[in-house]
Image: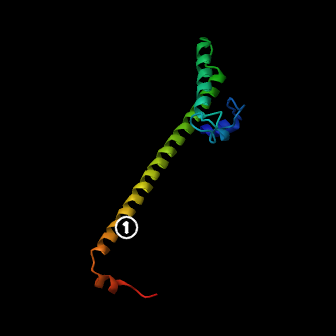
């Protein structure tokens, strides 16, 4: 069973300044807090990590790892996965934007070179090139 199946089966909720969030809600959060967003994936990860550390400090050395630990680890894995996907998406978007800007520059230069080629032609050659509507 994958982590998202486990999360939905266990109805996991993530604490945030906006209240409890579902796994689906996490996809809508920005990576970091901005002026118009009160919650972020980074904040959720910090809270889960803090809880994980607190649980490890209060570990029972005789019994197995408590169930709460496995739930917190699942939460952390989910938040890390979503962060990684969003980082990859941002990188792809940045690359696409850079490619679009580069292509626009190239098209502009092609247009300028085409104009320069036309300007080097004589009036007679230009008149021959004219087409009637």
- Where is mark 1, residue-wise? 111
- Residue at (39%, 55%) from the top-left corner? 102
Say left or right for 120 vs 18: left
Q: Residue furthest front?
A: 123
- Residue at (39%, 58%) from the top-left corner? 105
Q: Position of residue 119 (x, y in %)?
A: 30, 73
Q: In the rendered image, which quarter is residue 108 located in? A: bottom left
Q: Position of residue 100 (x, y in %)?
A: 44, 56
Q: Is residue 36 above or below residue 110?
A: above
Q: Nearer the viewer, residue 32 or 111?
A: 111
Q: Secondary structure at mark 1?
A: helix
Q: Position of residue 68 (x, y in %)?
A: 66, 23
- The image quadrant where one finds the N terminus is top right
Q: Residue furthest bottom?
A: 132
- Residue at (67%, 31%) from the top-left corner? 14
Q: Is residue 105 above or below residue 64?
A: below
Q: Residue furthest top?
A: 61
For label 1, count other residues whose C-alpha is less than 10 Å away and answer few (under 14), some (14-19) or many (20+): few
Numbered-mark total:
1
Q: Is residue 74 above or below residue 63?
A: below
Q: Nearer the viewer, residue 33 or 128?
A: 128
Q: Nearer the viewer, residue 72 or 100?
A: 100
Q: Position of residue 53 (x, y in %)?
A: 58, 19
| Colour convention | rainbow
Q: In the rendered image, which quarter is residue 28 located in? A: top right
């Amino acid at each position: 069973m994958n982590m998202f199946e486990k999360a939905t089966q266990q109805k996991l909720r993530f604490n945030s300044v906006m209240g409890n969030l579902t796994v689906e809600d996490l996809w809508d959060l920005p990576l970091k807090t901005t002026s118009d967003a009160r919650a972020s994936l980074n904040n959720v990860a910090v809270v889960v990590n803090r809880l994980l550390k607190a649980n490890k400090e209060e570990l029972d050395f005789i019994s197995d790892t408590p169930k709460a630990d496995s739930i917190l680890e699942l939460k952390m894995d989910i938040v890390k996965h979503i962060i990684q996907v969003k980082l990859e998406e941002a990188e792809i978007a940045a690359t696409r934007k850079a490619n679009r800007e580069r292509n626009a520059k190239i098209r502009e230069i092609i247009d300028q070179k085409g104009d320069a080629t036309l300007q080097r032609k004589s009036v007679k050659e230009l008149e021959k090139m004219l087409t009637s509507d």
